[in-house]
Each structure stands twice: as structure tokens, then as C-alpha cells.
Image (tube, rainbow, N blue to C red):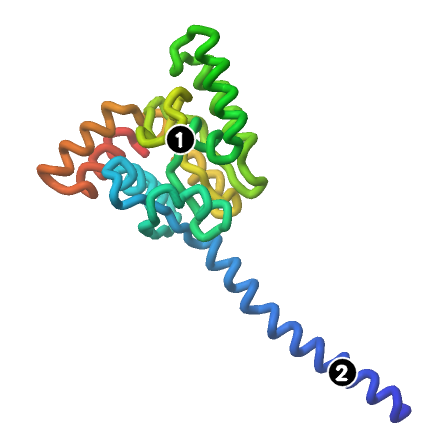
Amino acid sequence: MKPGLKLFLLPMLLCVAGCSAAAEPHSASQEERLASITIAQDADEPEQKILAELYSQALNRHGKRNEVVDIAAGEGWEAINERRVGMVIACTGDVVGRAQPELAEGLEKKFAEADAQPNSEDNQRATYEYAVHSLAGFLQVPDPSPAQGCSESEFKDLPQNIIPIYDAAALDRETRYAINKLGRYLDEQTLKDLAEKAESSSLEDAVREWLDAKLI
């Protein structure tokens, strides 16, 4: 082999070895992110703690490792979009308001002019669809739950059906089915009952009993 050719090939061989080694940590990090999911909660909100425990236990039952972490009030939208967490518990109207404030204000006026109940089925469906279309491409939500939440949202005249927003790559078909089923059974009375039972025993036990009863 000519001396010049040896000098040309040596950096290429070194790059192949070095570049491959540099790529491994990124791949491992991605695998780790998909193997487990971080669920964010506003620990100052009792409703958020109940919801986070519900989704955490439901995911555990279906083989998805997870960790519940505390975030500051109102930080969930930024955290999920920046992929700092893998799931946040949100509400349809609040999602629309955070993603598209002008659209949310327009919907509030439209619903008011129609002289309909803010939480009519049509309004709930429309708000949910706008919420879905407001999400980044890597995010998904299940069907909305009947329960209304986010009482502190500034968009009080929009339906606020509770929905978990999650990184689509982190959940498989089985876990998606589980959280969808959970949402269908979740109503405001359930949240009140769980809060009361948690006072006499523990939140973990109250949630476990409810999930058992619903076969989730």
C-alpha cells in the first residue's frame, strides 16, 4: 500500500471506532427512556396526587416501570413538550388555552353565544379535538375521562375533561389500553371517594382497591 494511502485511511479507521463508541451512550439513553416513564405531578394539588397514583399503579400492573416526580404548579405543559417528563395529567380546555390562547378565547365566546352549557357533550367533544390537534407530533392522549378537573385554569368557560398527555414512544398497545380504560371509569365522584378513603387508610391502598374493582 502506498504511504499516502495509509495516511488517508488511518483517520477514517479511527473515526469508525471513535464514532461508534460515541453513539452507544445515546442509544442506551433512548432505550432507558422507553423502558421507564416519568409521571409529573403538582404535589400541592391533592387531585394531581390522586391522578398520578392512579396512572402510576395502572402502568405498573401492565409491566411499565415508572416514577412519579414533583413539578412546580403550571409547569407540566412545558415539561412534557421539552421531554423532561414522559407523562403529565392535564385537562382538555387548559391544553387548548396553553397551546393556542386566542383559539381558546374564541371557543369560550362561541360556546357562550350559542347559549349552551359549557360542558355539553358537543362542547366537550369539540374541545377535546382541538386539544389533540394542539399537541406536538410525539405526544398522544387517550379518550377524555368524564371527570372535570383543572379548577385553577384561567379558561374556566371551556370543558376541562381530564386527560393524561404522554410520550407516544414510551407506551405500547397494552399500556395504552389500560390508561384508556382507566379514563372511561374516572369521574368526579371517584376522585372524591378516593380522597376520602385515603384519609382513613392510604392513597396507595385506596387506588389499589379501586383498580382491582375495575379490573384494570
Out of 75 and 38, give the one closest to the viewer: 75
The amino acid beneath tag 1 is: Cys
| Residue bearing the label numbered 1 | 91
Measuring 37% from the left and 42% from the top, which residue is drawn there?
Answer: 74
Q: Can the viewer see residue 181 in this picture?
A: no
Mark 1 crowd level (few <14, some 14–19, many ≥20, 10 Å Cα)? many
Q: Looking at the picture, does residue 145 appear above or below residue 17?
A: above
**Which residue is painted at 46% across and 45% down in the image?**
78
Residue closest to the eye, 128 or 152 = 152
Give the farthest residue toward the left: 200
Position of 211 with respect to 14 (left or right) is left
Task: Say left or right for 95 vs 162.
Answer: right
Is 72 situated left or right of 22 in this image?
left
At 42% from the left and 8% from the top, the residue drawn is 116
Q: What element carries label 2?
A: helix
Q: If you read the primary sequence from the N terminus, does the residue marked by circle 1 or circle 2 appear first? A: 2
Measured as percent of width and height from the top left, residue 199 is found at 11, 38
Observer-nearest of 166 and 156 = 156
Task: Give the mark toward the camera: 1 or 2.
Answer: 1
Q: In the rendered view of the protein, which quadrant contains the N terminus?
A: bottom right
Q: Which mark is residue 70?
A: none
Question: Which residue in the structure is indicated by mark 2?
Answer: 11
Q: 77 or 34, which is in the foreground?
A: 77
Looking at the picture, how far across and down is residue 51, in whole percent?
A: 30, 37
Q: Where is residue 127 in the image (x, y as percent from the top left)?
A: 48, 22
In the figure, 44 relative to 108: above or below?
below
